[in-house]
Image: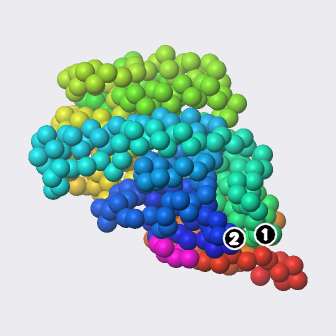
Amino acid sequence: MRMTFLGAAGTVTGSKYLLEHRDQHVLIDCGLFQGYKQLRLHNWDPFQLPVRDLQAIVLTHAHLDHSGYLPVLARNGYRGPVYATPATCELVKILLRDSGRLQEEEAEFANRHGFSKHAPALPLYTEQDAERALKLLHPVELHHRVTIVPGLSILLRGAGHILGAATVEIVADGITLVCSGDLGRPNDPLMFAPETIEQTDYLLIESTYGDRRHPEESPEKQLAEVITRTALRHGITLVPSFAVGRAQLLMYHLYRLKQQHAIPDLPIYLNSPMATDVTRLYQRFRSEHRLSLEDCEGMCQGTHFVRATRDSIELDQQRTPAVIIAASGMATGGRVLHHLKALAPNPLNTLLIPGFQAGGTRGAQIIAGAPSVRIHGKEVPIRAEVVPMETLSAHADADEIIEWLRGFKRPPKHTYVVHGEPNASDVLRRRISLELGWSVSVPEYRDSVELTPIDPSSSSSS
C-alpha cells in the first residue's frame, strides 16, 4: 500500500491522504486548504489523479478542512461513495450547502463592488456542486467494519472533537493504518473522550496543539469576566465561532452562566443559520455527546437564533450590551465579517477569539495585534478589546495527545505527524520520539511512502 500526503502535511489545513492499493485509490479526508493565500491556491490545483481513478473517500469528520473539497471532485466527475458516520453525513449536508452558497455570494459581492483582482471573481464551487457531492454520502456506524473496495476495509471509532468525529482504521493485505482525524479532549464538556486504540502498524496523528498545553483556567470564569467587563462599559461581545461544536459549546457555557447569575441578563444571538441547524442535530444525536435533554433545551431557549439576512443586518445597529456569536471561526467569511466591520472600530466592544487560528486568517491577524484587517476590499481598524481564548478548544493538547498514544499496547512501525503548523508538528515529533521511543517523522506536502506489513519476528519495541 502506498500513501501520499495531499494536505495537512507541513500545515494544519487541507486534510487529504491518498491510499493506493492494488491499482485502487482511496482518499482519507477531502479537505479545503484555508489560511495563507499560497495554501488556498492549492484548492485550485488539478487533483493528484483523474477522478475516475478514485474509488472511494472516507471522512473523519465534517469540518471544511476535512470535507470541503468534496464538491470540487463531484463537479469534476467523481461519482464513488463517500463514507462517514451518520452524524458526520448530516453535518456535511449543512456545511457543504452553506459553503457553496457562501462562495457564490462572496464572488457576486466582489464582482458587484469591484474589489477582486479577478474579472470576474469565481467561486471555487457552487451550491449545486455541493448537492452533487451530498448524493454520494454513505453513512457507516461506529464499530462496524466495512469493505469499501476489494481487499480494503475500514473501521470507525469515536474521536471526540465534534459530533460524528471518528478515527479511521484501514486494513489491507495484512497492513493496518490508523488515521486519528482531529482528536477531542478527554474531559470535554460536550463530547465523549476519544476511544483508545491498542494497535496499528502505521499511524497518522494530528498535531494542531502539538507544541502547547491548554490553559487550566475555567472557560466559564473567563467568559463571565470578559462579558461582564464589556457590558459594564456598554459594549457588545462579538465571538467568531465555528458553526459545528464551538457554537454549541459557547451556548452551553452561556446558558450555565445565566443560570448561576454570573453574567448580566443580556441577549445572546447566534447569527448563523448553519449553526442553528447544527444545534438541532445535537438534539437528534443525543447518545453521541454528554449533554442532557434539559441542557439541550435550556441552551436553545436562552439563545436568539438569527436566520434572516435582514435580521443579521439589524444586529449591527445593536446599541445595548449583548453577545453575538457568528460564523466563521477564523473570520474568513460569513456574517461575522459584517459584524467586524460594524463593531471592531469601537473600543467599547470586545472581540472574543476562541480556539486555534490558522496562520493567514483574519482571526490570527487580530490576535497578533494587527491595527486593522482587510474586509471586502477595505481596511477595518481594530479598536475593540481583543481577547484570545484557548480554553474552549475541541482539540486535544500536546499532553492529551501523548496520553492517548500511550493507549497503544505496542509501538506502530512508524508514526506520521500531520495536521499541524511546522513548529507544532516538530515539537510533537520530538516528544513521541523521546518519551515513547517510537519511529516517527513529519511528512511534507505530496510526500509518498510505502506501507509494508510488520515482520512478526521483529522486536515489538523497534
Q: Is residue 127 above or below residue 268?
A: below
* Residue nearest the observer in this picture, 129 or 447: 129
Q: Is residue 368 a member of the stretch shown in magenta?
A: no
* Residue nearest the observer in this picture, 83 or 444: 83
- Could you tell me which residue is drawn at 59 percent across and 54 percent down? 57
* Residue nearest the observer in this picture, 48 or 300: 48
Q: Quadrant of residue 229?
A: top left
Q: Is residue 447 a member of the stretch shown in magenta?
A: yes
Label at residue 30 = none
Disc 2 secondary structure class: loop
Count neighbours of disc 2 (C-alpha within 10 A) and say few if under 14, some if 14 to 19, many if 20 or more: few
Q: Is residue 374 above or below residue 450?
A: above
Q: How many marks overall?
A: 2
- Could you tell me which residue is drawn at 78 percent across and 69 percent down? 173
Label at residue 173 = 1
Image position, residue 225 (x, y; %): 40, 35
How was this image coloured?
Answer: rainbow
Q: Are marks 1 and 2 in contact (CB under 8 Å)?
A: yes
Count neighbours of disc 1 (C-alpha within 10 A) and say few if under 14, some if 14 to 19, many if 20 or more: few
Q: Is residue 80 above or below residue 189?
A: below
123 to the left or right of 121:
right
Res 400 visible: no
What is the quadrant of the N terminus in the image? bottom right
What is the quadrant of the C terminus in the image? bottom right
The magenta segment: 443-448
Label 2: which residue? 22
Residue found at the very far right of the displayed protein: 457
416 to the left or right of 258:
right
